[in-house]
Image: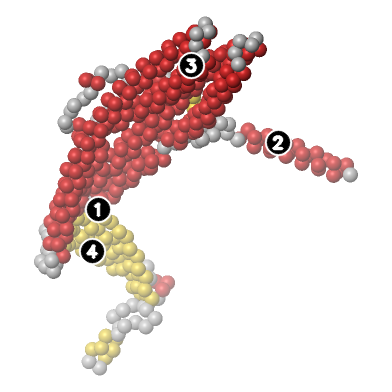
Amino acid sequence: MRTMKYIYLITAIWCGAALTSSAQQIPRDSIYHFTLQDCINYAYQHQDSVVNANLDVKSADYKVKEITGQGLPQINGQANFQDYLKTPVVIFGTQKFSIYQKYTENFGLNLNQLLFDGTYLVGLKASKTYKELSQRNYTRSKIQVNVNVTKAYYQVLVSGEQIRLLDANMKQLKQQVDETIAENKQGLVEKIDVDRITFQYNNLITNRENTVRMLSLNAELLKFQMGMPIKDSVVLKDDLQSVHLDTALSALPNDTGFYHNRIEYNLLETNVRLNELQVKQKKAALLPTLSFTASGADVFQTNTFSQIYNTAYPSSYVGLTLNVPIFSSGIKSNQIKEAKISLLEAQNNLFNLQNALDLQVSKARISYINGIRSLNNQRQNQALAQEVLRVARIKYQQGVGSSIEVTQAETDLVNADNQYIQGLYDALISKVDLDQAYGNIK
């Protein structure tokens, strides 16, 4: 019994230590205090699309080295062993004899060096252009992530501003609710006035609760766009005052060559160059190719296996191989024509993209102008609604106004706040879209 108790005690201690060690290894949720730029930088390191695009750049670098290596010396070793179960014979007149040994083994090295191949030279240029394409794809991924993170960051800021306005309205309305209830107890106002303002206050509470839940969802969306685990927390260090929306509309850029700054245009330009190189490569296939070869080997032959390495018979040679295309039944000429058609299509796509980008900039400019003017108008309406509410409350307190007038003013202020929040979000998003349209986001 003592032995069993001792075993139980040791087991309990071991299990407790194991649980403690396991608990220490469980990572705690991380909390980050990030500016907008911090969020963008984090996304560059963790967002899957950017990470994979960066891996494509590394893969393209290896591809360039692979193609470059095709024009460098290629050395291969070989070994061969043969055991003739029946050695071949040579018939000479009426005599039959064999010139082969039963056991044959050889070891050799082969060297091949490409001296001239037009397709290789063009392919080498194409591989470098392909690497450039992967780098621009990487840049495009970073730009898109930048845009997505920025919009998500602004959405969280706007939700926070909406909660701030709701809190201010609730504070004012709660004071009015308490005053109305007190006045009702004194017989100064009717019960319907209490019910009316309480109903409005309850709606504000519900609206705030909904906005808080949306704020939590928007924060999770931000973390998703950043590639951050949802269980982690991010605290925003920037505020809406740090976002400059007061740019004079007359100062908006009007650069007709802006599309050269757009990564989409750069990508199609690179694609056109690749198609041009494809045409050159197909034409280069009509040129001769020249290569150098060299080989050296040691051959061992014997009829007795134990003596196979007693005598070596070395051999070696060097040579040139010239391959001249003469007739391919139209295969290569048709390949050239196909490559030219692909080039024309790429050039057409580039031209069409320029028109599309012009249209996108026009749309972004109009949206931004409308967004800024609408936001300014909503700010004025918000101030007017606050003033109307202030006057309505004074009139009601002095007995020259009705509770209905105050309630309507409260409703108008809530609507003005909601329209201001929507206008603020639209203006922020239109600013991001305008920057992207002009290629200002790198």
Type of the residue with mark 1? Gln
Q: What residue is rendered at 46% in x and 26% in y?
A: 159
Vertical arrangement, residue 159 with respect to residue 352, above or below: above
Type of the residue with mark 2? Ala
Q: Residues within 10 Å of mark 3 (few under 14, many from 20)?
A: some
Could you give the CA–CA distance between mark 3 and mark 2, rounded to whole angstroms? 70 Å
Residue 64's x, y, as percent? 27, 46
State which tag comes first along the sequence, 3 or 2: 2
State which tag comes first along the sequence, 2 or 1: 2
Type of the residue with mark 3? Glu
The residue beneath circle 3 is 405
State which tag comes first along the sequence, 1 or 4: 1
The residue beneath circle 2 is 17
The residue beneath circle 4 is 316
Camera-nearest label, 1 or 3: 3
The residue beneath circle 1 is 70
Could you give the CA–CA distance between mark 1 and mark 4, rounded to whole angstroms? 24 Å
